[in-house]
Image (cartoon, rainbow, N blue to C red):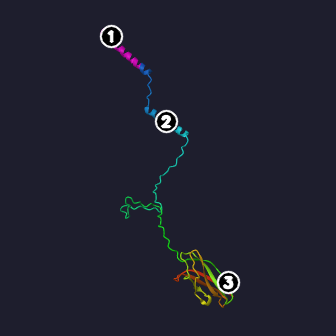
Amino acid sequence: MSKRKQIIASYALIIMVTVLLASCGSSATPEPTIDVNLIATNAVHTIEARASETAAAQPTATLQPTYTPVSYTPTPAAGSVALPTAGSGGTVPTTGAAAPTAGLPVAAPTATLGSVGDKGVWASQTIADGTHYKAGETDDLTWYITNIGTTTWTTSYSIRFFTGTNFAKAGNTRYALPGTTAPQETGAATIDIVAPSTAGSYTMSWVLSNENDENFYIVDINIIVD
């Protein structure tokens, strides 16, 4: 009897399990499988789309100019003086000696002026150039000359014929100065003339000479003989 109950119980259990399994298989709905990679890809695409929309909405940035640094090497100014260095062949100033200043002019020594000596300048004359004379006509010609030198002209000074047609009286070639002429004074040198016998224009030059016959000033005269 007990064995029969065990068999019946076993069948009943099998039937119950079968029914339970059938019930679970017909009512259960399988859950969808979530693809994590697909979700990540969609998220990236969404972020990129939003970034593109934001960039398009912003104004275009203005490019700033770029600058390339220029290498510059200073050049010594014209006229500058290079100071000597040891071993360069120049002399290096010793302690206490002033080094030369570059670019500054060096003051030249002051010259000591010597004596000017004999020197004159024309002041006037008694016969104007171009004066007309008849043949053989005589006259006295005086040149007034100012002494602008540092010596005093004495009666040892003279006026001598130098060049041209000599129409001094008797062909004289030298006349002594009549007196002394100190510096800044005006002296006189006088000769007598005779108009040549032939008509024409005549010019002659005379020079002032010191006691050593050293010439230092020249004068001239021109006359016309009708």
Quadrant for the C terminus in the image: bottom right
Q: Which mark's residue is nearer the viewer, 3 or 1?
A: 3
Residue 79, placed above or below residue 219: above
Label 2 secondary element: helix
Q: Name the residue under label 3.
A: 131
Q: Kindly report the secondary structure that dominates the magenta region of the rendered protein.
A: helix
Q: What type is the residue that disc 3 sits on?
A: Thr
> Split into 4 quadrants, where in the image is the N terminus?
top left
Amino acid of disc 1: Lys
Residue at 38% x, 15% y: name it. Answer: 16
Ranked by sequence position, the earlier of labels 3 and 1 is 1
Q: Observer-nearest residue: 191 or 88?
A: 191
Residue 36 as seen in the image, left or right of residue 194: left
Q: Where is residue 150 in the image (x, y as percent from the top left)?
A: 54, 75
The earlier-in-sequence mark between 2 and 3 is 2
Query: Residue 151: image x %, image y %?
Result: 53, 76
Contact between marks 3 and 1 (CB within 8 A): the answer is no
Residue under circle 2?
47
Q: Nearer the viewer, mark 1 or mark 2?
A: 2
- Picture coordinates of residue 223, whole percent (x, y): 65, 85
What amino acid type should be assigned to the residue bearing mark 2?
Ile
Mark 2–mark 3 distance (CA, rounded to whole Å): 122 Å
Residue 201's x, y, as percent? 65, 86
Crowd around label 2: few <14 · some 14–19 · many ≥20 (10 Å): few
Q: Which residue is drawn at 36% across and 13% down?
A: 12
Find the distance from the CA under tag 3 to the CA under tag 1: 192 Å
Mark linked to residue 5:
1
Q: What element carries label 1?
A: helix
Magenta part of the protein: which range? 1-22
Dot 1 crowding, Cα within 10 Å, few <14, some 14–19, many 20+? few
* Callout 3: SS: strand
